Image (cartoon, rainbow, N blue to C red):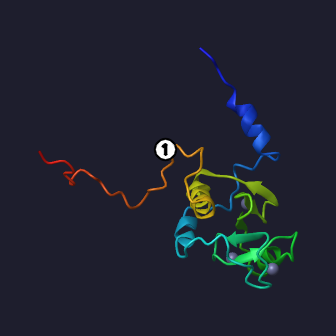
């Protein structure tokens, strides 16, 4: 049997290992997230720059990165909202941890941004439960009555 080492591939993808136990990721974060449709082309709310924006996972505001005018960092300082996702590389940043973070809780958010950005599901999308909540059982639909 051939054991292709996919871990090498993953390490090339992420130069920085994200933190896996950020305590600021709350389970109700998805409810906040779903209140607004994902629009990755949305400009920074403050300076209208479109080059590199983040979205706050707490209140859904879209603001620019530290490489532009740092308005998301400013937002964090004013509101204390710690978690944001990048529209550029789909990474999560926690201002409170001051680190990149990742969690299964955040996975549906990442998938929804990926779909908004690329128009398709991510290649590493397997059986992640992004359909949680609305489980439409297809048993009642008799598709092929003979
Ligand atoms: Zn954190
Ligand atoms: Zn800005
Ligand atoms: Zn916010």
Say what secondary structure mark 1 lies in: loop
Image quadrant in which the N terminus is located: top right
Give the residue pinned by disc 1: 127
The C terminus lies in which quarter of the figure?
A: top left
Question: In the picture, residue 64 is in which quadrant?
Answer: bottom right
Residue with the most extreme top position: 1
37 relative to 118, above or below? below
Residue drawn at point x = 44 percent, y = 56 percent: 131
Q: Which residue: 82% across, 61% down?
A: 98
Establish if 126 lies above or below 52. above
Q: Is 55 positioned to the left or the right of 69 in the image? A: left
Q: Quadrant of ligand 2?
A: bottom right
Q: Residues within 10 Å of mark 1 (few under 14, many from 20)?
A: few
- How many numbered markers are drawn? 1
**Residue 118 position within the rendered picture, expressed as x and y whole percent measured from the top left:** 62, 59
Viewer-side residue, 108 vs 1: 1
**Residue at 19% from the left image edge and 51% from the top image edge:** 142
- Quarter-wise, where is residue 85 in the image? bottom right
Furthest toward the left, the residue is 146
Residue at the farthest bottom position: 46
Picture coordinates of residue 97, whole percent (x, y): 79, 60
- Image position, residue 12 (x, y; %): 79, 39
Q: Is residue 16 left or right of residue 33?
A: right
Q: Quadrant of residue 82?
A: bottom right
The percent position of residue 83, horizontal first and vertical second, equals 70, 66
Viewer-side residue, 119 vs 1: 119
The residue carrying mark 1 has its beta carbon less than 8 Å from ligand 1: no
């Amino acid at each position: 049997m051939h054991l292709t080492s996919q871990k090498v591939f993953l390490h090339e993808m992420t130069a920085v290992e994200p933190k896996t136990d950020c305590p600021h990721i709350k389970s109700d974060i998805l409810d906040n997230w779903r209140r607004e449709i994902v629009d990755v082309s949305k400009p920074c709310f403050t300076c209208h720059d479109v080059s590199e924006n983040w979205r706050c996972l707490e209140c859904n505001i879209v603001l620019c990165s530290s490489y532009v005018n740092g308005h998301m960092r400013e937002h964090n300082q004013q509101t204390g909202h710690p978690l944001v996702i990048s529209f550029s590389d789909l990474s999560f940043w926690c201002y409170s941890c001051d680190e990149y973070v990742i969690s299964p809780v955040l996975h549906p958010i990442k998938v929804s941004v990926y779909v908004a950005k690329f128009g398709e599901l991510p290649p590493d999308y397997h059986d992640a439960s992004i359909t949680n909540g609305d489980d439409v059982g297809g048993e009642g639909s008799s598709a092929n009555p003979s």
